[in-house]
Amino acid sequence: MATFKDFRNKVKPNWCPGCGDFSVQAAIQRAAANVGLEPENLAVISGIGCSGRISGYINAYGLHGIHGRALPIAQGVKLANRDLTVIASGGDGDGFAIGMGHTVHAIRRNINITYIVMDNQIYGLTKGQTSPRSGEGFKTKSTPEGSIESTLSPLEVAIAAGATFVAQSFSSDLKQLTSLIEQGIQHEGFSLINVFSPCVTFNKVNTYDWFKENIINLDTLEGYDSTNRLAAMTKLMETGSMITGLIYQNKEKKSYENLVYGFSQEPLAHQSLALSQAEFDNL
Ligand code: SF4
Ligand code: MG
């Protein structure tokens, strides 16, 4: 049986020392081992950005795709081989700016994959510009007077779009993050896990200490019901989306694969795609 170490390859991550993405990778490895996967059962598909490099560091099937397009590729991988556990991953710029159209439609399609977003509220790879997740007034080289645009709340968008699994965590909370990734993998449908993953090099506002001071862990709130869609939306709006934990889960809605006629048969990857001579002759 594979351990978390089996999901690490020999490539040394070139993230800056202290980058939150190291912990996200560790949590993915642990979660994969904890749910009983072997490296050959897993595919990690990523987009472009510092966090997008993650697919090159995990010992599994992997594809480092193009900017904002991790989800279309990941959905294709899953539909072609439904035996694989598929994780899509990337940053907030990748998934919530250029890729936001794909994100919304992947959510409402509810294909059984897990999307992990490393949200550092900035564009790190291109050396620090304002992202859709940056706070109002946030100063960067692209917004020297401070951002005047509203900050996007992707989790509110996700719930409005019909998401069946919405969670959020902090890269420093490895235990919670690992558990949420395990739950996301086991969820029968699309799971979105947004992870506050600080960029220590370019974001000097949303630091580890800032997150520690501002995060509200749902586990500490009495009576929170993660099956209540309205309560989830209300809590996100009340807190400026600063909650961590399992925010919303709907186990009733069937996944896309379960609803498509004939998909209960062999995955595409196991079928012969070419017509045999006999099949051709009988057309
Ligand atoms: Fe991480 Fe920021 Fe460095 Fe990119 S620039 S590796 S996001 S710390
Ligand atoms: Mg980012």
Image (spheres, rainbow, N blue to C red):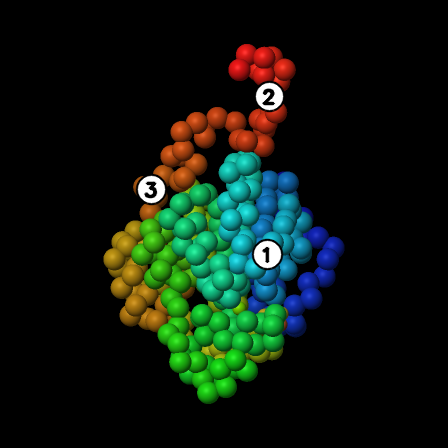
Residue position marked by numbered label 2 in the rendering: 275
Query: Residue 6: horizontal and vertical position, in percent?
Result: 67, 48
Query: Residue 262: horizontal and vertical position, in percent?
Result: 43, 27
Residue position marked by numbered label 1 in the rendering: 66
Q: Are marks 2 and 3 in contact (CB under 8 Å)?
A: no
| Separation of residues labelled 2 and 3 (CA atoms) | 36 Å
Residue position marked by numbered label 3 in the rendering: 253
Query: Residue 13: horizontal and vertical position, in percent?
Result: 68, 63
Check disc 2: other Cα within 10 Å, few if <14, some if 14-19, many if 20+: few
Q: In terms of depth relative to the viewer, which is nearer, 107 or 29?
A: 107
| Separation of residues labelled 1 and 2 (CA atoms) | 33 Å
Give amino acid for label 3: Lys
User: SS at mark 3?
Assistant: loop
Residue 42 is at least partly visible in this image = yes
Query: Residue 260: horizontal and vertical position, in percent?
Result: 40, 33
- Residue at horizontal 46%, vertical 54%? 102
Q: Image height check: is 280 above or below 26? A: above
Which of the marked residues, 2 or 3, is nearer the chain's N terminus? 3
Residue reaching furthest right? 10
User: SS at mark 1?
Assistant: loop
Residue 26 is at least partly visible in this image = no
Q: Is mark 2 within 8 Å of ligand 2?
A: no
Q: Image height check: is 53 above or below 18? A: above
Check disc 3: other Cα within 10 Å, few if <14, some if 14-19, many if 20+: some
